[in-house]
Image (cartoon, grey):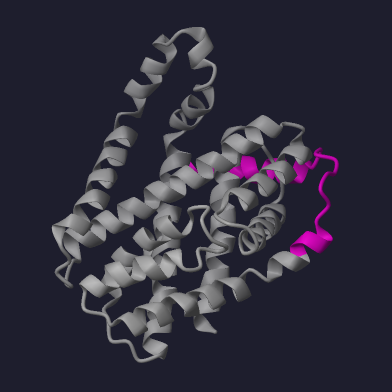
Amino acid sequence: MAAIGVYVSTQVISAYRWQLLAAVLKLYASFTDFVALRFIATFTNTLVPGVVGGDALRAIYLGRRNSRLGEAFASVIADRIVGLIGLFWLAAIAAIFLNGAGLSAVVTAPPIGIGLITLAAFVASPLVIRLVHMMPPRLSRYASFIVAYLEHPGAMLAALVISMVVQSALAVCQYLLARGVGIDASLTLFLFCVPIAGVFASLPLTVNGLGVREGAYLVLFGMAGMGRTNAIALGLLWFVSTTLGALPGVIAFAVTPLARAHSNERARQTAARAMEDTQ
């Protein structure tokens, strides 16, 4: 129950991250709407392979509210990319400073490398903006959304920090499950293995990552000495927990209209204040 509760809280926090990123493109809705759309997407992802279905659905909902479908899809893509960057940053930190399990460099090197590359890209964002402006107009038009986000480093940094908090909370969820069934493993091991396994589980191969996640756990946790039975049991418990935690999406789907008037001034003011607080 604790793991499910923490998981539900990560969906609410992720909804706030998406609201920040959407506001950069001047896409506005109330925080309650973003939470509802997040749960709708999460529940959808328990029924279809990967995360594409849920992401497309929440983009359509938001785009219909603002009559700007392209920008809505861009905000969802940005939300997903920022989530992945935060995931690799957390895994890199865990691999560099918290590798108490003594995992092989073959496993830890890729997350560290990706983390450092994305960190360098974030620091060099002014240079990236200049390079985009130097591109031919036909190409720079497609990169305009990237520039919009890079020109708001405060919002981007806040979203990245939120992503790391969310990934840490997901690791805590699975640590709680492990303790509940008597698996003796350190929290630091979960801070590294859970984000990496999450990348594989999000691939559009099986419904809610079933089977793919367990395979990743067998490899990652197995290298740290966890038995095969425990690794598979942990993956199945997490599958059940995320499915139960996504059930509020059924209610959200039932009460959330696909389109409505987007002249919600209070939502616009709330999102604008949130943007100002991050800059």
**Residue visible at 50% across and 63% down?**
209
Image position of 201 (left or right of 24): left
Magenta segment range? 252-279
Answer yes or no: is residue 159 visible: no
Quadrant where the N terminus sits is: bottom right
Residue at the image point whose x is 77% and y is 32% from the top: 67
The image shows residue 165 at horizontal and vertical percentages of 42, 60
Q: Is residue 98 above or below residue 136?
A: below
The answer to whether residue 198 shows anywhere in this view is yes
Residue 112 image offset from top left, x and y in percent: 23, 50
Against 183, is 12 above or below? above
Q: Is residue 156 above or below residue 163?
A: above
- Horizontal relation, residue 214 to residue 226: left or right: right
Q: Is residue 261 magenta?
A: yes
Q: Nearer the viewer, residue 94 or 13?
A: 94
Left or right, residue 13 beside residue 160: right
Magenta stretch: residue 42 in it? no
